[in-house]
Image (cartoon, coloured by chain):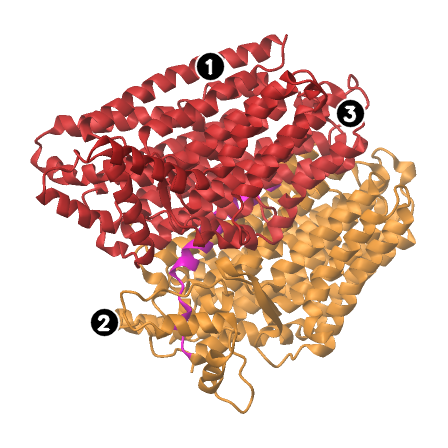
Chain colours: A red, B orange
């Protein structure tokens, strides 16, 4: 194969296959460039950057939506794009729609609360859209380098966003803390990536899984030879996990979260807690499934490859084409995962991940809920609440990976629970932080005590906030109940002592979390107005926005069907 | 109208709530009128249902309504009443209707108060009519938030503490319940039931001339979504590919619990799935009942809650626990119930004794009544748990039937007497603003009509023959005799303690020469509103005491049938145990216990 054919196939792959599937991201890129350059031209400064940002993200959302309506997700043709660096499948499609929906709502919110004003509006929108772009890459990453790239693309703008309020010491402190913490974990993660890639000879996730199968870890564990390899792999995995745990704000890498949330503005908190977290979870799924699962078809190929010893030497483009081909094959097959019984060569990898995730999730959840008790600042309390919810979401991933060995449906439904959780969490947390932001504008305070007696001055906001908080507890008939139920279901289906322990922990955590959420409800609905507070009046638009964002919390509680259908379809191809 | 009567009963208060929210601020009389109508209409419908529509000779589920609610998890909107729930539905509508005028003395944020009261009624009624486990759970939780606010906003000095305590206890219980629901759901399989069992579960509608098998074949050919799933699942010939058809249908789960081995699988620590499910459910329900040692939320909640809320709390909310035990715990997990029967009875007796002693020690009038509730609800747990249909009695279910009927009767009787007692305490609290038993005395002279009514209602709580409290207690205590002499003797002795604390309270409050406590000048005779609330309660206490059949004949067919089913299950179970014969491995279907 000479250079010309290599370049040709690369070009062909990029232009014909990859870029058409990358349209929403391209639209985001275009919007960012347009926003930055529009002021260069005469008259450009009169075009508000809000309009460009909103239009750009709407176009991106429109491009991300499947053509035949949301219900047609399952028909998406899965493909590896950009020579296997990214993967395009139903999960990518779902996450992109989710992230871009959030982007649209977020841009409207920051405009209304005035955090992105006329002068530095374009900075704010550029950073936010840039971070969203990074998150889209995280959600579709298929290669350790794109994982790192996505995380950094999402994180660096977030550091700046956290400190965007100029002249506030707390805000700057939060940004610095966030950046230092992020840089540290990124370094550790990079080291982990180099270890994994070094041992396995590749950074392409499906190939890594095949290499893991080829290593035959169970045999190594039994014979005790090469235990160093296993240790290096485990160490690499743990270090990779550090980077993910930072993004997820999972214990013990959560320390940045409360400080950043308190220092940054409430709008940015919404951004971090919904979009950033969702992308990190999607990435966790990519890593977990990428390493813990080898599709049937590639197993056969692997067997073939083992007969011919040139399996790593194949060129990048060749491998990508091969992989693309394989993926198309699998979608036509009836996947029989029964073949992957628990004695499969990857079961130690899965077990490692499941134990790690289960322990981290239980600790994260419990710690978040307990630490939220003592908080007096609403943003800090909600920060701990997001830590706790990250714990519940990681439980779903743990259940899903542990079900991988037992066939597809259980694992898929656990993953669907995660996606449903993300979707419902968007409404709950965006609603909560929007209320916090609007109230901050109205009364210059973010202390829980200052929310006293809100029910008398703005009853609608108080009722909506109550609904959101109770929904965060997870009580029916509000939206937050369903994802929690689905997670519990997934844990139960996964079975086994560890999952049962996680299940009980999740259940008890619900009861623990009740107290601090209800304390805010109590302050809002029962306590008298504090004397020091100014009168609170909210305009029509903020109330309308809050209503639009948080009404789904109530409506979806009674009619969750449509969303769970979408979530279910979005996981149909995860076992490619 | 009549086929949707249950939905109307449940959701009319919700319409009322919406109407209340639309009333302009400050128009409190309109709010009260709407509340009266929105609680009155369900009462009228429930009374109509009780006296004329309900077929009291039948033990089957009546007025069923069913449609698919959430397809993905197979949750249905499935409601219906039988003898177990009919009286409780009626009691709920009655007490909620009475609670509205009893709330007229509340002046703070009335619009919100009545709106929450309506929501509370929706939740409680929903629990009693739900035949889908999931729906049951949702209604169970719906009731929590309004109750939290009703105690937390309108309560006494320690209202917030009491409200969160109530919420937390119930939530812990319901989380355990949710886990149990998942356990049962994921082990259920509709395809393991035969035609007759499906008909019993209310899934097949069998007309009079057709057999269950015909109905089954008709059903499988219909375009009903569940039927098609059923066909698809049963049609799968490869056993490895065969999936289970899970269900939340409570009646179907009961059939599975009694006729298949679906829930006998290994759970954790060597105990079966149904053992764990029973335990989790039982804990969830006895928190609500409440039984010792999980009762500590109740005195606080009762003391701090406003009078009408105390009436509802004692009158119907506690009954949800008892109802859950008889509707869900025993029929779905008979094996575990059999194993834990003595434990259940023991919990009941401990509650009776402990509650009675605690009531004796109280200085606060309302707290005393609250502890009397713990004691009285102990009878319910005891009566439901008397598994006397064992080998020693020749599997004679009669005593157990008596106990269960007594427990059901006791729930209604206690609903009336305790609501009345709380109201009576509230009447004097409104006047003198304290509840210290030792500061009362001589009320008879100042408020003769009130005192007469109050003493009548307190006697009903005491269990005086001729009043409603007597029937339930005597049925329960009699039934225990055959089960365990020790428990019978102890529970009979509790009657003396009960008489002790009630008579002592009557003596300290109503008798005596004159009232020496604070605010003596405020002791005016009972008002017409209070009279209209108290009188029906006393009348009913007398009617049910003199003519218990007015309640029993509605409950008895359903209760008896359930106990007979469980008794025959016990017999089969024991025969299997003695034969040490493993179950038929093919499908685990035993010979139908109830042909």
Q: Earlier in the sequence, mark 3 or mark 1?
A: 1
Is B490 situated left or right of B51 in this image?
left
Label 3 vs label 1, nearer the camera: 1
Real-space CA distance between mark 3 and mark 1, rounded to the nearest whole angstrom: 38 Å
Question: Exactly how many numbered labels are in the figure?
Answer: 3
Q: Nearer the viewer, mark 1 or mark 2?
A: 1
**Residue B386 in view:** no
Q: Quadrant of the C terminus of chain B?
A: bottom left
Q: Secondary structure at mark 3?
A: loop
Q: Chain of mark 1?
A: A
Residue underneath mark 2: B581
The reply to whether discs 3 and 1 touch (Cβ–Cβ < 8 Å) is: no
Answer above or below: position of B2 versus B322: below
Question: Residue B377 has which mark?
Answer: none
Q: Give the side of residue B343 with respect to residue A169, left or right.
A: left
Q: Residue furthest front?
A: A4
Q: Residues within 10 Å of mark 2 (few under 14, many from 20)?
A: few
Label 3 crowd bin: few (<14), some (14–19), many (20+), radius 10 Å: many
Q: Residue at x 79, y 25 (%)?
A: A536
Q: CA distance from mark 2 to mark 3?
A: 71 Å
Q: Is residue B23 left or right of residue A296?
A: right
Task: Report how far apart the C-alphas of labels 1 and 2 lie in the structure.
Answer: 68 Å
Q: Please, what is the dominant secondary structure of the magenta stretch?
A: helix
Tell me which chain the residue with mark 2 is part of.
B
Q: Which residues are magenta?
A: B165-194
Residue receiving disc 1? A179
As drawn, B60 above or below B279:
below
Q: Residue B114's x, y, as percent?
A: 79, 48
- The residue singled out by tag 3 in the image is A529
Q: Residue B187's spot in the image, x, y percent?
A: 38, 60
């Amino acid at each position: 194969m000479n250079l010309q054919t290599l370049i040709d196939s690369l070009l062909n792959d990029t232009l014909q296959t990859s870029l058409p599937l990358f349209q929403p991201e391209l639209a985001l890129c275009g919007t960012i460039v347009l926003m930055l350059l529009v002021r260069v031209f005469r008259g450009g400064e009169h075009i508000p950057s809000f309009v460009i940002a909103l239009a750009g993200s709407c176009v991106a959302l429109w491009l991300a939506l499947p053509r035949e309506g949301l219900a047609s997700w399952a028909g998406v043709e899965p493909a590896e794009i950009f020579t296997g660096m990214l993967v395009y499948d139903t999960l990518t499609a779902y996450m992109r729609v989710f992230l871009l929906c959030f982007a649209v709502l977020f841009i409207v919110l920051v405009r209304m609360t005035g955090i992105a004003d006329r002068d530095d509006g374009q900075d704010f929108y550029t950073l936010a859209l840039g971070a969203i772009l990074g998150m889209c890459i995280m959600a579709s990453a298929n290669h350790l380098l794109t994982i790192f790239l996505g995380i950094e693309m999402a994180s660096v703008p977030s550091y700046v966003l956290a400190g965007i309020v100029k002249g506030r010491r707390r805000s700057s402190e939060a940004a610095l803390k966030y950046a230092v913490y992020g840089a540290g974990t990124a370094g550790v993660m990079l080291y982990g990536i180099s270890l994994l890639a070094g041992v396995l000879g590749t950074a392409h996730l499906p190939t890594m899984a095949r290499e893991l199968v080829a290593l035959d870890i169970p045999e190594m564990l039994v014979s005790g030879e090469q235990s160093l390899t296993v240790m290096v792999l485990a160490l690499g995995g743990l270090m990779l996990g550090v980077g993910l745990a930072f993004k997820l704000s999972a214990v013990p890498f959560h320390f940045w979260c409360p400080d950043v949330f308190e220092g940054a503005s409430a709008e940015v908190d919404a951004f971090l807690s919904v979009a950033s977290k969702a992308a990190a979870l999607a990435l966790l799924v990519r890593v977990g499934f990428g390493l813990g699962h080898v599709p049937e078809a590639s197993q056969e190929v692997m067997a073939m490859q083992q007969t011919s010893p040139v399996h790593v030497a194949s060129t990048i483009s060749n491998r990508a084409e091969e992989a693309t081909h394989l993926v198309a094959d699998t979608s036509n097959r009836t996947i029989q995962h029964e073949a992957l019984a628990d004695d499969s060569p990857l079961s130690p990898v899965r077990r490692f991940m499941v134990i790690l995730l289960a322990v981290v999730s239980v600790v994260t959840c419990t710690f978040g809920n307990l630490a939220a008790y003592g908080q007096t600042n609403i943003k800090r309390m909600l920060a701990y609440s997001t830590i706790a919810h990250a714990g519940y979401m990681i439980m779903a991933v743990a259940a899903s990976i542990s079900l991988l060995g037992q066939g597809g449906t259980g694992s898929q439904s656990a993953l669907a629970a995660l996606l449903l959780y993300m979707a419902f969490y968007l409404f709950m947390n965006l609603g909560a932080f929007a209320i916090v932001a609007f109230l901050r504008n109205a009364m210059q305070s973010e202390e829980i005590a200052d929310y006293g007696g809100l029910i008398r001055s703005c009853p609608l906001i108080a009722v909506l906030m109550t609904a959101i908080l109770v929904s965060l507890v997870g009580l029916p008939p509000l939206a937050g109940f369903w994802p929690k139920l689905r997670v519990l279901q997934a844990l139960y289906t996964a079975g086994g002592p560890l999952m049962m322990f996680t299940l009980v922990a999740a259940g008890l955590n619900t009861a623990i979390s009740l107290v601090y959420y209800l304390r805010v409800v109590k302050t809002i609905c029962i306590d008298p107005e504090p004397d020091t507070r100014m009168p609170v009046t909210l305009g029509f638009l903020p109330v309308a926005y809050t209503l639009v964002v948080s009404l789904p919390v109530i409506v979806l509680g009674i009619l969750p069907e449509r969303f769970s259908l979408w979530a279910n379809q979005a996981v149909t191809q995860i076992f490619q | 109208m009549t086929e949707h009567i249950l939905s109307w009963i449940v959701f009319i208060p919700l319409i009322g709530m919406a109407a209340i929210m639309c009333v302009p601020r400050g128009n409190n009389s309109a709010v009260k009128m709407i509340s009266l109508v929105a609680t009155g209409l369900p009462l009228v419908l429930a009374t109509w249902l009780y006296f004329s529509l309900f077929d009291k000779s039948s033990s089957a589920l009546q007025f069923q309504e069913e449609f698919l609610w959430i397809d993905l998890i197979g949750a249905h909107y499935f409601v219906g009443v039988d003898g177990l729930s009919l009286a409780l539905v009626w009691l709920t509508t009655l007490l909620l209707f009475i609670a509205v005028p009893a709330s007229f003395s509340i002046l703070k944020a009335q619009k919100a108060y009545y709106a929450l009261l309506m929501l509370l009624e929706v939740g409680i009624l929903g629990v009693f009519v739900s035949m889908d486990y999931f729906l049951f759970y949702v209604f169970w939780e719906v009731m929590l938030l309004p109750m939290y606010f009703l105690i937390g906003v309108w309560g006494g000095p320690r209202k917030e503490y009491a409200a969160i305590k109530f919420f937390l206890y119930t939530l812990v219980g319901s989380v355990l319940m949710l886990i149990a629901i998942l356990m049962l759901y994921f082990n259920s399989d509709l395809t393991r039931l035969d035609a007759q069992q499906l008909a019993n579960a209310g899934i097949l509608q069998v007309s009079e001339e057709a057999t269950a098998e015909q109905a089954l074949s008709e059903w499988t050919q219909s375009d009903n979504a569940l039927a098609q799933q059923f066909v698809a699942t049963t049609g799968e010939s490869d056993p490895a590919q065969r999936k289970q058809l899970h269900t939340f249908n409570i009646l179907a789960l009961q059939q599975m619990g009694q006729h298949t081995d679906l829930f006998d699988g290994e759970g954790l620590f060597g105990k079966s799935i149904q053992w764990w499910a029973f335990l989790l459910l039982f804990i969830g329900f006895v928190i609500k009942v409440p039984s010792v040692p999980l009762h500590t939320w109740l005195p606080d909640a009762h003391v701090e809650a406003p009078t009408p809320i105390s009436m509802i709390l004692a009158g119907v909310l506690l009954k949800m626990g008892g109802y859950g035990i008889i509707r869900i715990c025993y029929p779905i997990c008979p094996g575990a119930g059999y194993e834990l029967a003595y434990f259940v009875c023991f919990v009941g007796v401990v509650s009776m004794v402990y509650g009675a002693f605690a009531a004796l020690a109280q200085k606060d009038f309302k707290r005393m009544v609250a502890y009397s509730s713990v004691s009285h609800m102990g009878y319910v747990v005891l009566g439901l748990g008397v598994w006397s249909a064992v080998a020693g009695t020749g599997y004679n279910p009669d005593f157990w039937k008596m106990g269960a009927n007594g427990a059901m009767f006791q729930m209604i009787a206690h609903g009336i007497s305790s609501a009345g007692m709380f109201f009576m305490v509230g009447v004097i609290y409104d006047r003198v603003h304290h509840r210290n038993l030792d500061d009362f005395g001589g009320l008879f002279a100042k408020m003769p009509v009130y005192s007469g009514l109050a003493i009548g209602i307190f006697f009903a709580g005491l269990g005086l023959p001729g009043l409603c409290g007597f029937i339930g207690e005597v049925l329960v205590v009699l039934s225990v005799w055959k089960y365990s002499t020790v428990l019978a003797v102890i529970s009979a002795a509790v009657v003396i303690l009960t008489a002790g604390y009630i008579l002592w309270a009557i003596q300290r409050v109503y008798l005596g020469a004159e009232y020496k406590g604070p605010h003596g000048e405020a002791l005016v005779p009972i008002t017409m509103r209070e009279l209209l609330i108290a009188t029906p309660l006393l009348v009913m206490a007398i009617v049910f005491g003199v003519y218990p059949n007015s309640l029993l004949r509605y409950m008895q067919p359903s209760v008896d049938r359930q106990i007979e089913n469980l008794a025959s299950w016990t017999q089969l179970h024991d025969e299997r145990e003695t034969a040490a014969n493993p179950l038929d491995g093919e499908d685990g279907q035993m010979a139908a216990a109830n042909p």
